[in-house]
Amino acid sequence: MMKVTPHKTERQRPATISGTTKHMATERYNPRDAEPRWQREWNENSVYKTDNNDPREKYYVLEMFPYPSGRIHMGHVRNYAMGDVVARYKRARGYNVLHPMGWDAFGMPAENAAMERGVHPAEWTYQNIAAMRAQLKVMGLSLDWSREFATCDVAYYQQQQHLFLDFMEKGLVYRKQSKVNWDPVDHTVLANEQVIDGRGWRSNALVEQRELTQWFFRITDFSQDLLDSLDTLEHWPEKVRLMQKNWIGRSEGLSIRWELVADARAPGETEVEVYTTRPDTLFGASFLAIAADHPLARKVAAGNAELEAFCDECRRAGTSLAALETAEKRGIDTGLRVRHPLDPSWELPVYVANFVLMDYGTGAIFGCPSGDQRDLDFARRYDLPVTPVVMPVDGDAATFSVGTEAYTGDGVMIHSRFLDGLTTEAAFERVASLLETKELGGRPQAERKVNFRLRDWGISRQRYWGCPIPVIHCEVCGVVPVPKKDLPVRLPDDVTFDKPGNPLDRHPTWRHVGCPQCGAAARRETDTMDTFVDSSWYFMRFTAPWEEQPTNRAVVDRWIPVDQYIGGIEHAILHLLYSRFFTRAMKAAGHAGLSEPFKGLFTQGMVVHETYSRGEGAQREWINPSAITIEDLGTGRRATLNETGEEIVIGSIEKMSKSKKNVVDPDDIIASYGADTARFFVLSDSPPDRDVIWSEAGVEGAHRFVQRVWRLISEAAPALAAAKAAPATEGPALVISQVAHRTLKAVEADYDKLAFNKAVARLYEMVNALAAPLSDVATGTDAATTAAMRDAVEILIHLMAPITPHLAEQCWSVIGGEGLIAQADWPRFNEALVTVSEIVVPVQINGKKRADLTIARDADQSAVEAAVLALDAVRTALEGRTPKKIIVVPQRIVNVVV
RNA sequence: GCGGACGUGGCGAAAUUGGUAGACGCAAGAGACUUAAAAUCUCUCGAGGAGACUUGUACGGGUUCGACCCCCGUCGUCCGCACCA
């Protein structure tokens, strides 16, 4: 399947070679020569430079900018090829297109490189950028490179610091103590994703939970708006909107305060507040449970060794996913007792339980075992009462019971005193309005409350290679923002990576600074921002990257929203949600006028590849596909190392990533076949939103097509160049014009929907249909045909230009087209050529196709029926009977029911 | 556990969203041109059958004149969330 060695025959072929003797001698299309030439031509004419003052309607197309890991891979090629088709298509359609590129350049890998190889993160990063920029340029993307920046450019992070200060002023930033995953070996905070089975992903050290003071963005201020506005994002995939909706996780419920029984309370405590979405099940309550971190639990645990040990254990176990799955519902009775809100004589125990989370709701729940599986498991374990209070609508109150499975659905209330017989919904309302008016300690005992799963965004990272948080800690004045005139807070260059931890912390001078307010000796914040901050507003910066403000209001408001954003589904939540928040925060701070940054979103599928490795566990070494050869043995496949012949383990298919080394560098393909073939190939066959398993099978076919188009057009070029385009309206050339204009209309629709694979298929069809008449034109034919063919070829070149721009220029120039195809206007299809006067409709008898009927397109029902009944196939099938019914779907199908 | 998507030839896929299933490409096979190869061109290509035809979109039902498409159930694959009260 995989030919790792590049195609020698192709490579060694001389640049020019004569074609067949049968045809006129033409030069084979040589991308190595043509592609750089056209790229130079585009550059010299600044074809892709975007003018902010261009009065035409704007169109902003953007692909998620890459992390400069070193080399681009096929996933990038796919992503940027798609964006480039959109950009070129929209440009041709008369839009003022913005299509920029930059680099998401801060982050851990640069620091890892520094630690492993002793190279400075900045040097490593900028070298990678240079290499990847060169690769992208070879692809011939229609990018406005004059707007390029990297997020690690001082000019960029300075403006990010500016934004941070503005957000601070607007109350959107705060500091708080929070629990973090702490790697004791690397001396750093780890994101949840970086903790694997309770261990640091790099150091393999047991991760600790630490309380650290961290900076947060108040994304939760916008919870409701972020949720509601999802409905306005019609051009986003439903899947992404749903994922964000679930992530924000809105729930409506009731916050109920439960009175602690006088002789069973902790000192100074009189009540426990509990959040519930099911107040209807209140009569099914049999216990309260609080989180190990709940203040009440801490208080009671202070004098209770057993409880203290249990709480410690809960805190430790918290993180690991595997632990959660198998963890039993366990708890310890605190000895505290509460009164039931609807019956003062009813006392319930209070447990500390391992399944209650401190950071959701109030950190305390009431357990209704019959209506919740966890509560039921817990109740069975500790022998607590299980009273069914909701049964299905068709249930029988006398016999309905709950065994080992809770009934969590809606239904009818039972065993619930005055609620009996009510629906779940009515009972909810009844309890809520009752407790809202009931008082406890001078306040309503309960209030309706909306809760969100979404947490504030912790942005502190104890890393060097990130945007410094622009604040100063003064013993006198406290936290003092760096004055804007003192920005940027630059990263120091002279840092060492020989020890774990944050180099900023141990830099001899950097952190020491005078307090901007009182002048006293103070220290800089040494945390840097999460790299997700960098990517949360780069799309706005592209609109005016030269500004000495984060944005130019007039300009950003003109360009935003991004009309078409293209990137991987893996960013469905974090990046896209953060960007939506950031845009709102920037609006609040006056840097933008809109809330939603991305009008259209397209999530392209990943390019995945098998992984190859040798060794086991920690010794496992990943191997690049280019280093091995694969044989098909019939019974299975065998991979061997090219150098030694050693057998290699073929592993699972995964997204191309540097760490697994299952990347395919596009350079080989581009060098062998050219950028156009590579672009055409990655857009062929598979729908763009679907994952593809990388295989070079088929790239030959794409290359064949590119060459075929060139050969057909260049052979006919002398005749075409002498002709003026004129679609045929009658005569033998009519077919040519119909094919061309119908394809034009269809491909337009495909490009509009980003259905590149379908557009490619139609291009094949068009070329297949035009091949023979094009050869005729080349050898000489009548003027009408040549004129129609000139029109058709112009259309073909326009249609190809977004996908294979170099080839299109070459063809355009050889037929004597005016200017550059990259700057030419999109052709218009001729409606009369698209609609047909006579059509062929299939004729079914009892749902089976028996004949074709050729008939006028606008024939009415009775004419169609008459024509159908006159068909031989229908008459023999009917054998003299009269049909029961004839269904005529105009222009589609006819079904005769016998 | 909850939520979602998907399942079509040897392979990647298409089907105007209820109207000819398999367009287009890859692979394969046959032929033409050639001393030969490459390139190019022509044809075949879901299964069964000489054939007209029959059958076929994971599986089992249903609705309909007509179902890859809608409904019910089953199986499988993938993704997201996950002790969220």
Image: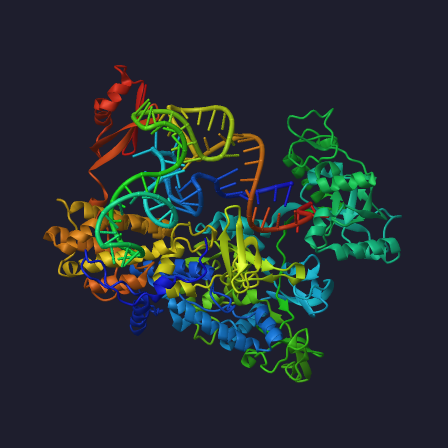
Question: Quick one: A166 or B13, which is closer to the camera?
Answer: B13
Q: Which residue is drawn at 65% across and 32% down?
A: A411
Residue placed most toward the observer, A892 or A711: A711
**The C terminus of chain A: image quadrant:** top left
Left or right placement of residue A719 versus residue A345 in this view: left
Image coords of residue A841 (percent x, y) = 27, 32
- A509 or A674, which is in the foreground? A674
Residue at point 26%, 62% (across, down): A28
Viewer can see residue A826: no
Decide: is A392 above or below A166: above
State how the image is colored. Answer: rainbow
Q: Say if A68 sits above or below A732 in the image.
A: below
Q: Residue furthest top?
A: A880
Q: Residue at x 60, y 66 (%)?
A: A171
Q: In this view, does A226 lie to the left or right of A16?
A: right
Hey, which quadrant is residue A96 in on the image? bottom left
Task: State how many labels appear.
Answer: 0
Q: Position of residue A383 (x, y in %)?
A: 83, 38
Seen in the picture, residue A62 relative to A119 is either above or below; the reply is above
Pick out the residue farthest to the left: A782
A753 relative position to A879: left or right: right
Quarter assignment of residue B22:
top left
Res A227 visible: yes
Residue A838: horizontal and vertical position, in percent? Answer: 20, 36
Nearer-the-camera pick, A292 or A753:
A753
- Image coordinates of residue A609 in percent, x first then y, are 51, 55
